[in-house]
Amino acid sequence: MKVLIAVDSSPASQRVLEEAAARPWPKETTFCIASAIDVTQFAELPVLVEDAKREGAQILKAEAEVLARASHIATAEVLLGSPAPTQFARHVPARP
């Protein structure tokens, strides 16, 4: 089973991660923690875009560790663009 968890900086997102970590899942379940960063306002400033990606990756890595500590397999994906739900489905690659 593959589980995509889209997160933002809200306390609700943290709670979702904690709940996912606490629940039993089939052995082969993998999680992808994803967040979209809308960088269109910074398109002319590539240094800011890179900073946003780096900061986002650090935050998502820490969030993926919540699941890893519960012995779940978790990866993190920073997506650039609109956080619209359809963006996640298009940009997060299927994992074997």
Image (tube, rainbow, N blue to C red):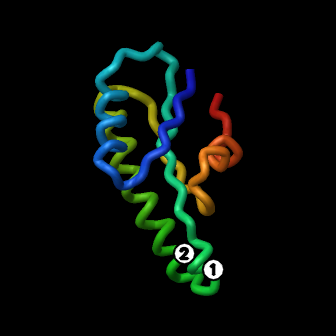
Q: Residues within 10 Å of mark 1 (few under 14, many from 20)?
A: few
Q: First in sequence, mark 2 or 1: give its number.
A: 1
Q: Which residue is mark 1?
A: 43
- In screen coordinates, is 78 left or right of 11? right
Along the viewing direction, whichever of 52 and 82 lies nearer the viewer: 82
Q: Which mark is residue 49?
A: 2
Please state which amino acid type lies under the numbered disc 1.
Answer: Ala
Q: Position of residue 58 (x, y in %)?
A: 39, 59
Q: Position of residue 6 (x, y in %)?
A: 49, 43
Along the viewing direction, whichever of 35 and 73 lies nearer the viewer: 35
Q: Are dots 2 and 1 in contact, CB under 8 Å?
A: yes
Q: Quadrant of the N terminus?
A: top right
Q: In front: mark 2 or mark 1?
A: 1
SS at mark 1?
A: loop
Q: Which mark is residue 53?
A: none
Residue pictured at 50% horizontal, 22% vertical: 29
| Residue 27, placed above or below residue 44 | above
Q: Residues within 10 Å of mark 2 (few under 14, many from 20)?
A: some
SS at mark 2?
A: helix
- In screen coordinates, is 38 left or right of 57? right
In the orientation shown, which residue stands out farthest toward the right?
Answer: 90
Residue pictured at 32% horizontal, 42% vertical: 12
Q: Quadrant of the C terminus?
A: top right
- In screen coordinates, is 77 left or right of 90? left
